[in-house]
């Protein structure tokens, strides 16, 4: 059975919560990504995520200024996390149930990867 660790993208991109959306957009273009994991403030904090969809729906659509809106104002937090050993079948079930397109892979200490719907499609045999 294929596991999350087998198909996940390992090069996870992070951003801090106090960064303005205008910088997020520039970094997304430069790094050719559609989301960033929002770093935790400390060990007791939860991870977050900011996606291209968040920026479109929560900032651009509502007319908020990109240069005055911070990541923490629009990011989703806390995240749904999965373990590296979870089978892809259950990854798909989780993603469908909570209506998300990507889910970070957490080894109990840190995020070690992320599984997106693109990763799942690319690994269909």
Image: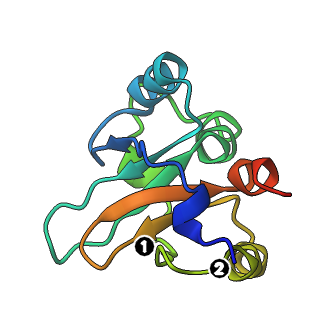
Residue 87, picture quadrant: bottom right
Q: Quadrant of the C terminus?
A: bottom right
Residue at x-position 43% and y-position 24%: 27
- Extreme residue in the right direction: 125
Q: Please indicate, yes or no, whether residue 103 appears anywhere in the rendered image.
A: no
Give the residue number, with chain letter if any, for mark 2.
Answer: 87
Label 2 Cα crowd, 10 Å radius (few <14 / some 14-19 / many 20+): some
Left or right position of 45 against 65 = left
Residue at x-position 69% and y-position 45%: 57
Give the residue number, with chain letter if any, for mark 1.
Answer: 78
Residue at x-position 67% and y-position 71%: 2
Q: Please indicate, yes or no, whether residue 56 appears anywhere in the rendered image.
A: yes
Residue 41, picture quadrant: bottom left
Residue 67, picture quadrant: top left
Q: Is residue 100 above or below residue 32?
A: below
Q: Is residue 59 above or below residue 98?
A: above
Tell which of 106 and 54 is nearer to you: 106
Left or right position of 74 against 47 = right
- Extreme residue in the left direction: 42
Percent across and percent down for residue 95 are 71, 72
Q: Quadrant of the N terminus?
A: bottom right
Which disc, if any, is residue 28? none
Q: Is residue 62 above or below residue 109?
A: above
Residue at x-position 35% and y-position 63%: 111
Tell which of 45 and 82 is nearer to you: 82
Label 1 Cα crowd, 10 Å radius (few <14 / some 14-19 / many 20+): few
Percent across and percent down for residue 76 are 50, 62
User: SS at mark 1?
Assistant: loop
CA–CA distance in space, label 1 to label 2: 22 Å
Percent across and percent down for residue 35 are 53, 43
């Amino acid at each position: 059975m294929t596991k999350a660790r087998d198909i996940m993208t390992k090069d996870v991109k992070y951003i801090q919560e106090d960064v303005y959306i205008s910088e997020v957009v520039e970094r997304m273009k430069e790094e050719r990504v559609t989301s960033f994991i929002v770093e935790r403030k400390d060990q007791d904090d939860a991870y977050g995520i900011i996606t291209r969809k968040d920026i479109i729906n929560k900032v651009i659509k509502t007319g908020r200024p990109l240069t005055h809106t911070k990541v923490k104002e629009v990011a989703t937090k806390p995240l749904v996390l999965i373990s590296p050993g979870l089978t892809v079948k259950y990854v798909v079930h989780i993603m469908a149930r909570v209506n998300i397109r990507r889910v970070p892979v957490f080894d109990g200490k840190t995020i070690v990867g992320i599984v997106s719907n693109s990763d799942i499609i690319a690994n269909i045999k």
